Image: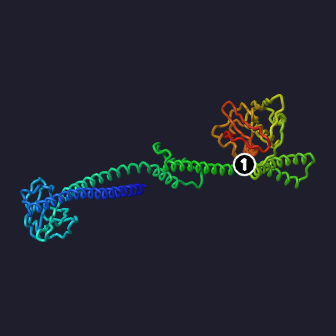
């Protein structure tokens, strides 16, 4: 990540520096062209004035003006040279401090020997003074009085300004590039820090064995409040959600495997005892004679054990059917009658408990599958009778609301351990404790309740503390085929 960060800063700084260089070159070219254009205008004015002075003097006196009488028309760092053929007839050089003198022989020779075209501006390099813009014109009408007027204006000030500008823009450009690189590094670091944290978390996850066992929390990528909504923040958020899904899925798989192992052991135990009894009775009475009463008693025991096995197999088949085809019948069900009949059966099955009913005076009817509703209520009532001690008060009630009917099964028993609540409706889960008065079951009753409620589009919920437990089944009022309102089901037992 640091290598990527450095490369990104280098690329950004390089692009910025390239842009600054291009801008600097363009501005230097524009500045020089502007200054040269100004110098060219000055040269034009100076040359035009000098040419007019020479022409006027020739017309009035027939000769060139004297140097001392020649008005100063050439700007500082400029020169004037009048040639009669190739011989110098008049010359002047104006210094930068506004002083003037005649051109030296060497200077005249160097100017005269430079190639130039009359009435055109050329650039001339003088060894002692630098670069000049020079123009020349021929004046005089008669062949014996034809003179060449040469005027030049130096570019030293222009070159000095451009050089200073290059130095300053280079210094400022390098400073800006360095400052931009520093700020860019900080900005890029701030933007990439979440990705570095993401990479670290991902590396820790890859180093963690996830093939088996319960998965411990793998940590989460921190989210910078300053970068909320950025791409890096969305990547961190997506990774955190992915880790949550992976952890929950792997832990659910682990719980399912553990439940399956417990179920296999429990089911094997449940099936082994009745099978052993049936086999023992069969082997014994096939070898030894017995009176009819003993045979009848043995057959009764064989039937009871077979019924016990059948109940276990029927529960498994019911869950498998609900998984494969969760479609349920839809008919009008007299829920009050179902509650009365189920509680009547529970009083005989668990006479040591106190059973109470609270239903409205008018019959409560709902849409659903009567067999499924009976099975759910029977399992909830049986769960209360099985997992609570003798003397526990169990209350079954119906509550009608505007758009739903609530079926409640409440007891004042010791409650369900908090750790068992999240997986209470999972298959093969057993939440019994030391208060349970009967042998533990294989943990399919509440799983069947959950599966039937889901298939019927009901909501199943549970609340439990040290004062008791309350199971609720919420049955919406709707016509056949209507969709069930969306809602989150509560945690269940």
Helix, strand or loop at mark 1: helix
Q: How many marks?
A: 1
Can you give x and y, in whole percent of width and height, for residue 372 in the image?
Answer: 80, 43
Q: Which scheme is used to colour this image of the protein?
A: rainbow
* Image quadrant occupied by the N terminus: bottom left
- Find residue 485 and report its image quarter: top right
Tell me what residue is drawn at x 81 percent, y 46 percent.
329
301 vs 452, left or right, is right
Can you give x and y, in whole percent of width and height, for residue 117 in the image?
Answer: 21, 69
Front residue of this view, candidates 484 and 287: 484
303 vs 92, left or right, is right
Q: Is residue 297 above or below residue 343?
A: below
Can you give x and y, in whole percent of width and height, for residue 338 in the image?
Answer: 83, 37
Residue denoted by label 1: 266
130 vs 335, left or right, is left
Front residue of this view, candidates 227 and 172: 172
* Image quadrant occupied by the C terminus: top right
- Find residue 35 and report its image quarter: bottom left
Tell me what residue is drawn at x 45 percent, y 52 percent.
196
User: How many residues crowd mark 1 within 10 Å: few (<14), some (14–19), many (20+)?
Assistant: some
Q: Is residue 339 above or below residue 444?
A: above
Front residue of this view, candidates 244 and 78: 78
Front residue of this view, candidates 379 and 138: 138
């Amino acid at each position: 990540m640091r290598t990527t960060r450095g490369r990104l800063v280098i690329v950004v700084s390089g692009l910025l520096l390239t842009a600054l260089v291009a801008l600097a070159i363009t501005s230097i070219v524009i500045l020089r062209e502007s200054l040269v254009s100004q110098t060219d205008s000055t040269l034009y004015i100076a040359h035009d004035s000098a040419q007019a002075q020479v022409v006027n003097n020739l017309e009035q006196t027939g000769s060139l003006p004297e140097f001392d009488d020649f008005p100063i028309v050439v700007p500082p760092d400029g020169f004037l040279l009048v040639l009669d053929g190739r011989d110098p007839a008049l010359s002047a050089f104006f210094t930068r401090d506004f002083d003037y003198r005649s051109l030296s022989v060497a200077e005249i020779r160097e100017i005269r020997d430079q190639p130039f075209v009359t009435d055109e501006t050329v650039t001339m390099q003088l060894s002692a003074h630098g670069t000049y813009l020079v123009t020349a014109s021929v004046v005089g009408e008669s062949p014996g009085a034809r003179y060449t007027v040469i005027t030049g204006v130096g570019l030293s000030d222009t070159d000095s300004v451009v050089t200073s500008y290059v130095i300053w823009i280079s210094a400022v450009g390098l400073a800006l590039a360095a400052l931009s690189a520093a700020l860019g590094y900080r900005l890029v670091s701030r933007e990439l820090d979440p990705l570095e944290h993401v990479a670290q978390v991902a590396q820790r996850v890859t180093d963690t064995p996830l093939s088996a066992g319960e998965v411990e929390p793998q940590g989460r990528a921190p989210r910078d409040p300053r970068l909320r909504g950025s791409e890096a923040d969305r990547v961190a958020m997506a990774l955190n959600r992915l880790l949550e899904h992976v952890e929950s899925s792997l832990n659910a798989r682990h719980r399912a495997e553990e439940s399956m192992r417990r179920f296999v052991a429990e089911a094997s135990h449940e099936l082994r005892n009745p099978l052993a009894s049936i086999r023992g009775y069969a082997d014994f009475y096939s070898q030894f004679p017995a009176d009819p009463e003993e045979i009848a008693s043995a057959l009764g025991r064989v039937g009871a054990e077979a019924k016990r096995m059948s109940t276990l197999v029927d529960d498994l088949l019911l869950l498998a059917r609900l998984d494969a085809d969760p479609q349920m019948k839809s008919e009008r069900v007299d829920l009050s009658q179902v509650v009365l009949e189920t509680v009547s059966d529970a009083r005989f099955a668990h006479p040591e408990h106190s059973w109470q009913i609270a239903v409205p005076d008018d019959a409560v009817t709902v849409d659903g599958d009567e067999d499924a509703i009976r099975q759910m209520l029977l399992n909830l009532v049986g769960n209360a009778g099985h997992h609570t001690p003798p003397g526990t008060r169990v209350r079954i009630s119906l509550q009608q609301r505007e758009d739903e009917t609530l079926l409640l099964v409440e007891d004042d028993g010791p409650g369900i351990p908090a750790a068992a609540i999240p997986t209470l409706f999972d298959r093969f889960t057993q939440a019994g404790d030391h208060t349970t008065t009967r042998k533990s079951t294989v943990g399919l009753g509440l799983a069947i309740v959950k599966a039937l409620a889901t298939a019927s589009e009901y909501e199943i919920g549970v609340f439990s503390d040290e004062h008791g437990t309350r199971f609720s089944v919420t049955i919406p009022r709707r016509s056949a085929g209507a969709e069930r309102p969306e809602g989150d089901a509560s945690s269940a037992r």
